[in-house]
Amino acid sequence: MSKGKSVFRCTECGADQPKWGGKCDACGAWNSLIEEAVGRTTGRPDGRNAAASGASPVRLSEMQSTSTSRWKTGLAEFDFVLGGGIVPGSVVLVGGEPGIGKSTLLMQCAARLESQGVSTLYVSGEESPDQLRLRADRLDEDAGGIHVLGETRLESILHHAAQLKSSVVLLDSVQTTYTEELEGAPGNVGQVRECAARLMRFAKESGPAVVLVGHVTKGGGIAGPKTLEHIVDTVLYFEGETTLDHRILRAVKNRFGSVDEIGVFRMTGAGLEPVANPAAAFLAGRSTGASGSAVTALMEGTRPMLVEIQALASKAGFGTPQRVATGLDHRRLALLLAVLERRGGLPFGNLDVFVNVTGGVRLIEPSTDLAILAALVSTVHDRPVPADALFLGEVGLGGEIRPVAGVERRLAEAARQGFRRVFLSARSRGTSSDMEVIGLEGIGELTRRLAA
């Protein structure tokens, strides 16, 4: 630790504490206080010369409405998640696990933007220009026109970006960048927050778009202070298993588009390829004759996605039955098993239960409850569900099946993929579809239909 005064700053909320403690007094997070050296300040706390340096207030009615054109990267799924392309002057944060493909994605975006005449600067604090060249040689895109810079000092990065008049600056990563205005090593709370704030001001005042790569913690969140996600305009998470081909780019914050939109990519030896039909991508290789399989439709932002849920129940080999959920909250699985046992009359006390969502998708919305129960009923009775059936519905603790939102769009996509019937709540509205609609009041009707 460098000499001088230091404070203890919370990595979760950014609050300062005079001394270390196990718990942050501001947000209540445990083991989140990290010692940080305090450097010199650059602002004027007394407010002198504020009128000379600050902007003057104006009325919104006096401002002219302008439509900002976006820069399209040519990667259809990336542009879709952003809401149509990169907005000039915006700051985008891309987070993901190591090796998931963040740097490859940004390199492809930079190559395509440069080929369209949009000047780009790719800054890497983790790889040298020679290593970036090796990465570029593996891609199908021609990345020879990209300006690359191996630098971690923020002042130097901003200088070169201004000299090149870059329209898009890609920084990999914000945790390796530091500013001379603060003491402390790169990656600490103060450095990450100050560098992000300086880059945000650079983007808003000078006009280029800035795309940042962020490391993630073992908990899955972006490393650094939580204020990092508040500073930027858009937060994207790059998800997926490194052992699988598919990658999912998810927008969790977007000031210029819809949140919860997802883009699907396929990782190949030549880079990432956008998946033209994501709704059918996760059903590839599905076996329609096996028991324990059911299909449901998710709503990821404005896009319906069809996913297969697989379940397997077998006699427990030990005293305590196992409950294993992949792509699903294990507590949700325990709740559905209790409802199915109590309201549906199926005993699971001596059975190991395994539930898997194919393709690396993670279920969050409750509209998938009915499909999970259908897969469980199917595996217990060892009877496959109809191959052309879709299951939509939330299941309550009383065993009732509740309607879900966005039924029309889900059914339209299912019909386009060849499904001909749908099991859902009898109280659902807006089901004017060519598919056969089977309304269910409770899970008792579901078990009788699937066991018949």
Image: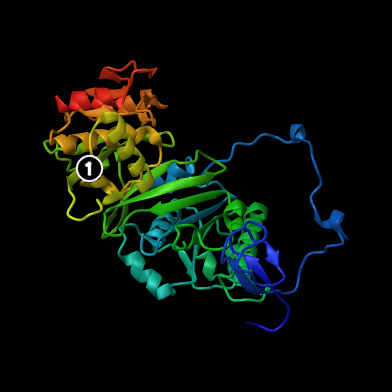
Residue 170 x %, y %: 50, 60
Q: Secondary structure at mark 1?
A: strand
Extreme-left residue of the structure: 289
Extreme-front residue of the structure: 319
Residue 263 x %, y %: 38, 45
Image quarter in which the C terminus is found: top left
The residue wearing badge 1 is: 311
Q: Amino acid at mark 1?
A: Ala
Q: What residue do we see at 28% from left, 59% from top?
A: 270
Q: Is residue 302 left or right of residue 175?
A: left
Q: Quadrant of residue 10?
A: bottom right
Q: Is residue 270 above or below residue 70?
A: below
Q: Quadrant of residue 413?
A: top left
Q: What residue do we see at 19% from left, 23% from top?
A: 449
Q: Nearer the viewer, residue 376 or 422?
A: 376
Residue 165 x %, y %: 58, 60
Q: What residue do we see at 58% from left, 68% from top?
A: 157
